[in-house]
Image: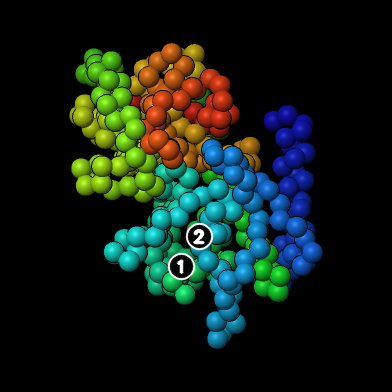
Amino acid sequence: MPTSKIAKSAATAAVLTVLLAGTSACGYYSQDTKPKVNSVTPTGNLAGSYYEKEVYTDQKGKFWIPLKPAAASLGYRTKDDTASGGYAKVGYTDVMYMLKPNSSEAFSLGEKITLPDAPIRHNGQIYITPNALSKFLQTEVGWNPSSGEINVSPPEDKDSGGAGTGAAKPLRIQSLSDVDKGELVSYAKKYLGTPYDFGAGTYEETKKFDCSSFTRHVFKKFDVTLPRLARDQDNIGRRVSRSDLDVGDLIFFTVPGRFESDAVPGHVGIYIGDGKFIHTWGEPGVQISNLDTGYWHDVILHMTRVL
């Protein structure tokens, strides 16, 4: 690792250690500390630590914060489907975390976990304790009940490889001769302009996609079954380099503003050739973007061949 990166990581770790060591169970920020910015979304919005006015302390003295703004501080979005029996979903352009009020069971980056405190619904919002949020997002959470300042450190995925080509994965789910890649691209393009919806249900039901439901829908047409979420789609196939990238390969992107060692896929698209890929995000929904220049080039995590 370059010296500058080592120094940066060491400094970050030192700050967190000092802050956490010198605090009570409540948090560590003084009232005059200004929120820091540590994330940029595709639309250019900044996200970072923040001041939360709608904190809640229960009769036992336990401190609770709303889930949605805490997730937004990392550039994540939240979709609450719990009213209809579903989960509250949190992620970037794809679902990465799921939980339900009054249940300590949750899903974090593809794994089932048990939260130390079950989330609750309070004043129409889902609330979570900082300790539970820390385990849910797999990161450090600091808070100051007197000032309302919340700081959620960018999470890291310690189990994934880096952003390079990585080690080859053993599974290739279909031989190259089984799928006409030109037909696959043509089929994907039929959905240009289809609306994007975070945590979308099946296309047949909603006529919408999020990033991983789009790739899954396209590949299903050619009898290739991909997992539902980008995180899980990233666990099949084998890594390829940019120079070896071929039509039909999947491209995974990380969430910007995280530590450089982070390797959590938050977005996925399909390479269609000529330095372009097709994916869905925001407006206008399914769209074609440049891979080698612009925003998405700067957040490429890695590229994977599944055909």
Residue 263 in view: no
Residue drawn where x is 51% and y is 50% of the image: 76
Q: Is residue 53 left or right of residue 101?
A: right
Give the residue number, with chain letter if any, for mark 1: 126
Per the image, label 2 sits on a secondary structure element best described as helix
Residue drawn where x is 45% and y is 55% of the image: 78
Three-letter residue code for mark 1: Ile
Per the image, label 1 sits on a secondary structure element best described as strand
Residue drawn where x is 28% and y is 17% of the image: 181
Kindly check if marks 1 and 2 are in contact, taking CB atoms under 8 A apart as contact.
yes
Q: Pick out the residue farthest to the bottom.
A: 59
Q: Position of residue 248 (x, y in %)?
A: 34, 21
Give the residue number, with chain letter if any, for mark 2: 68
Please name whichever residue, 32 or 151, is drawn nearer the observer in this view of the structure: 32
Taking 158 as reference, is 67 above or below it?
Answer: below
Quadrant occupied by the N terminus: top right
Question: CA–CA distance between discs 1 and 2?
Answer: 8 Å
**Sequence order check, earlier mark of 1 and 2:** 2
**Count of numbered marks:** 2
Q: Position of residue 235 (x, y in %)?
A: 39, 36
Residue 38 in view: yes
Taking 192 as reference, is 7 above or below it?
Answer: below
Three-letter residue code for mark 2: Lys
Residue drawn where x is 44% and y is 71% of the image: 124
Classed neighbour count for the residue bearing mark 1: other residues with Cα under 10 Å, few (<14), some (14–19), many (≥20)? many
Q: Is residue 172 left or right of residue 245?
A: left
Which of the 4 quarters of the picture holds residue 262?
top right
Please name whichever residue, 144 or 207, is drawn nearer the observer in this view of the structure: 207
Quadrant occupied by the C terminus: top left
